Amino acid sequence: MRRAPNAIFKSLADPTRRALFERLSHEGEQTVRVLTRHSGVSQPAVSKHLGVLKRAGLVRARHRGRQTHYRAQPRGLAPLVDWMSYYSRFWHDQFDRLEDLLERMDE
Amino acid sequence: MTTPATRSLMIEKELPYSPEKIWRALTQGSLIKEWLMDNDFQPVVGHKFNFRSTPAPNWNGVIDSEVLVIEPNKKLSYRWNALGLESVVVWTLLPTSGGTLLRMEHSGFRSDQDAAYKGASYGWQKFIGGLERLVASLQ
């Protein structure tokens, strides 16, 4: 499912969530308990942050026994990358329009 | 120290026009509207304004902006805040023998020393640096 870029930006604007996402990206799947140990905030806070990341499509949860394991979903970042390519096209088009305007303008 | 590896977009083109003429196209509201977007731009540092484009799904089409740099015929910079991303656009005009070398740089972060902004942008710079590696690993 495609998410709007603003949901992704918002979820990653928080430094704790960004750290959680980066950790999951680099270390692979981790339990909430392990993530809490490295995060410097409480377990309920970590769970809440993970919920936000999950809703933004950036992590996936897997329940095993009493533990919840989280995994990064790097593909969730795709709309963010689309954003860059969007602006690349945008500015090239605007440059063309600016040149057209300059041609029409008086000195 | 800022990371040189920040994600930014740069377009550079030599145009057969004087810097003065290009400056007008970049800084007069009615002219900006012709090639960029409707706006209430004023060439005054600190002036807060909007660019307005057609609303799209999940977006009202409004870009929040503020003039950051005005150096007539040389350099222009404004904020470009939309869709939750705070970015900055910098225009540089360099006179050449045949006209002007016009450069536009759109970056996610300010590179200046604004202390209030620095804390917030630092994390993003770091994050975007890692983003490219992450995206590369998707292949």
Image (cartoon, helix red, strand yellow):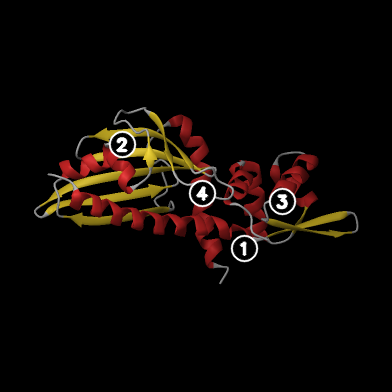
Find residue A49 and report its image quarter: top right
The kind of residue tagged 1 is Arg
Q: Residue furthest left?
A: B97
- B73 relative to A102, above or below: above
Residue B42 percent across, percent down from the top left: 32, 30
Same subunit, tags 4 and 1: no
* SS at mark 4 in the image: helix
Which residue bears the numbered disc 3? A55
Q: Which mark is residue A75?
A: 1
The residue shown at (21%, 35%) is: B72
* SS at mark 2 in the image: helix
Given the image, what chain letter belongs to the residue carrying mark 3?
A
Given the image, what chain letter belongs to the residue carrying mark 4?
B
Question: CA–CA distance between discs 2 and 1?
Answer: 40 Å
Residue B22 percent across, percent down from the top left: 20, 45
Which residue bears the numbered disc 2? B29
